[in-house]
Amino acid sequence: MIKNQARARAHTNIALIKYWGKRDAHFILPFNSSISLTLEPFYTDTEVCFDHELLEDEFYLDGTRQKPEATVKVHHFLNLVREHASISSPAKIISNNHVPNSAGLASSASAFAALAAAASRAAGLHLNPTELSRLARRGSGSATRSIFGGFVKWEKGSSETTSEAISLQENVDWDIQMIAILINPAKKRISSRNGMAATVATSPYFPAWVKTAEQAIPEMTAAILKKNIKLVGQLAQTNALQMHATTLAAVPGFTYFEPQTLQTIALIEQLQSEGISCYYTMDAGPNVKVICTAAETPFILRRLETVFRPEQLLIAKPGPGVMYYDKGWKGSDEF
Ligand code: PMV
């Protein structure tokens, strides 16, 4: 490995108990803790090389050099790393997303988790996963959780130094996975950043959201440890609807749902009434993620295929935490 250079991989995650609202926008401190599942097929690979001969940060995404306006977030994030490591060199950042474009699969989570891992290593900082999760949090809230594999909790914490991820169950040895349904791949109209800020500022339902989400955290933790898909699914579904209720009650109200989102919810509820263990969750976009078992997935897919094309249905098993490249991909503990 060349000095000042490192390459890392991080997977996306889908929240089962959502993060929706910042109590501190600068440090990205959330109002409530959240819980997610890291997914195996969707990830970002990022290579960072600090080089004093560069004139400025150069950011290449999927093979294309990004314009300055698309480099601002990355540049600000690297400034945090440079400050921490007491270095000043610009960096070349080469990032490749293995996440369907704007599919509502939180590519910002894998993007900032991979950037945090690669940039901190390249800068000579040897952060443990907890410290890394705090750094990733400064790029995007959901990136906090993508440092770990499997089921992960982001502790809201009491300060900048205690708002971090912890692993709830790294190796998921029971039958749970997701089907991501790509309803509309277009970029969302309202970013999660703006959507949550508007909700915090204007939705009278927001305090109730924070209270119910916090109450759901110990329940979801227990359901995961019991490996109880029914409880996990029901809690996730309820929490997703509660999050989306806050946006409808904002002033002006808004929703990420599209007609096919509601159509899918109805279809999943129909399958539930037939005794199938499948549950839905939605983030800041119209796409639906179905929580289900691998055993029942073929049956669920056949029903979904009455509405969607096969390429709109992506199966995702639980995935690993951050990895580094050194003559092959290695977990952070083996590096
Ligand atoms: O990390 P952000 O700013 O993209 O926000 C993510 C918000 C949700 O995806 C809607 C919920 C979550 O906890 O991931």
Image (spheres, rainbow, N blue to C red):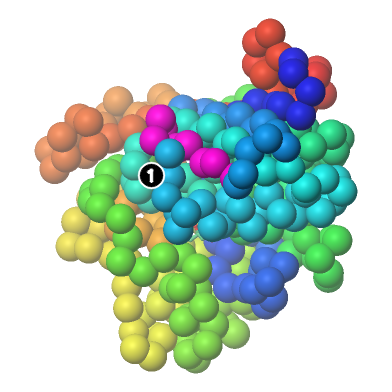
Which quadrant is the N terminus positioned in? Answer: top right
Q: Is residue 141 visible?
A: yes
Instruction: Please tell me which residue lies in front, 223 or 29.
Output: 29
* Residue position for label 1: 290
Instruction: Please tell me which residue lies in front, 202 or 335.
Output: 335
**Please, is residue 95 above or below residue 130 in the view?**
above
Residue 228 falls left or right of residue 156: left
Q: Name which quarter of the figure residue 286 lies in.
A: bottom left
Coordinates of residue 99 in the picture (x, y in percent): 41, 36
**Please, is residue 98 above or below residue 253 in the view?**
above
Q: Name which quarter of the figure residue 180 lies in.
A: top left
Which quadrant is the C terminus positioned in? Answer: top right
Disc 1: CA contacts within 10 A as few (<14), some (14-19) or many (>=20) = many
Magenta-colored span: 57-64
Q: Which residue is rendered at x = 77% and y = 33% of the image? A: 121
Amino acid carrying label 1: it is Val
Residue 4 falls left or right of residue 63: right
Q: Is residue 167 visible?
A: no
Question: Is 170 a magenta residue?
Answer: no
